[in-house]
Amino acid sequence: MGHDAHDHDHDHGHGHSHSHPHDHGKEHGHGHSHDHDHGHDHGHSHEHGHEHGHSHDHGHSHEHGHDHGHSHEGSAVAAEHKSRAPVHVSAFVVTCSDSRDAAHDGSGKDLREGLSAAGHTVAGHTVVKDDPEAIRGALAQAQAAGARAVLFTGGTGIGRRDCTVETLRALFEKELPGFGELFRMLSYQQIGSPAMMSRATAGTYQGMILFALPGSPQAVRLALEALILPELGHAVRELTR
């Protein structure tokens, strides 16, 4: 019943928006010509037409115009933010692992290739042990290379040696909890309940944005393509405001 009512409102509002008041009057006048001999019927027809136009057409037109304006305004703001965002961002990739080396760093390789393909600059990359001191050392290396974004992969689980999140979170000036929330939502759609085991997060540190990603290639590709690349330039721009 609600769906039918919505369809009726929309069709009626649309028809009225394209009709001129003069034409509308002609239509009522035509009805009058048929019911001329019945004054009561004529009065009833006029009243019915007035109520119908007021309750449906006027209300629907107002609501539709408001929604259209709101969506247009939101799109304009988003477009303006995107237009001012830097197209090329200098990024640094850090793989945190006790078992992998540069020759077996599939996730780091996927990140570097994805960033380069999107037009960003890879200022450098390194593989370090999943150790707080080593992770902080890699961050200092990225900062010295002029990176504005540092992507860490590995060490975001709940294993005894997983310490990337704790190490970076202690340095964050501002955390971006939405990144982890969205990543786990998207990950859940791919792999189901194991997605809750990921503690992926992001935050800011001394003019850089840091991302802590899981260690699997599938996970880093998801985070990069769905979340990081679409907003990387915008995020870096916000850091300078």
Image (cartoon, rainbow, N blue to C red):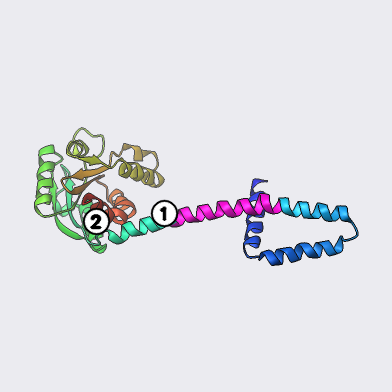
Question: Which residue occupies the foreground of this view, 190 or 101?
Answer: 190
Magenta stretch, residue numbers: 52-72
Identify the secondary structure beneath mark 1: helix
Residue type at mark 1 is Gly
| Residue 34 image position (x, y, % from top left) | 86, 63
> Which label sits in the foreground, 1 or 2?
1
Residue type at mark 2 is Asp
As drawn, 23 above or below 200: below
Q: Is residue 79 left or right of residue 148?
A: right
Q: Is residue 53 left or right of residue 171?
A: right
Disc on res. 110? 2
Please identify the quarter of the rendering in which residue 230 is found: bottom left
| Residue 85 image position (x, y, % from top left) | 27, 58
Asked if one can make out residue 152 in the rendered structure from this viewpoint, the answer is no
Report the residue that reaches farthest toward the right: 37
Identify the residue at horizontal 65%, vertical 54% (top origin): 57
| Residue 180 image position (x, y, % from top left) | 31, 42
Identify the residue at horizontal 32%, vertical 58% (top origin): 82
Magenta stretch prevailing secondary structure: helix
Q: Residues within 10 Å of mark 2 (few under 14, many from 20)?
A: some
Q: Residues within 10 Å of mark 1 (few under 14, many from 20)?
A: few
As drawn, 34 above or below 49: below
Identify the residue at horizontal 23%, vertical 43% (top origin): 203
Identify the secondary structure beneath mark 2: helix
Q: Does the segment drawn in magenta span residue 3? A: no
| Residue 51 image position (x, y, % from top left) | 72, 50
Disc on res. 74? 1
Q: Earlier in the sequence, mark 1 or mark 2?
A: 1
Q: Does the segment drawn in magenta span residue 66? A: yes
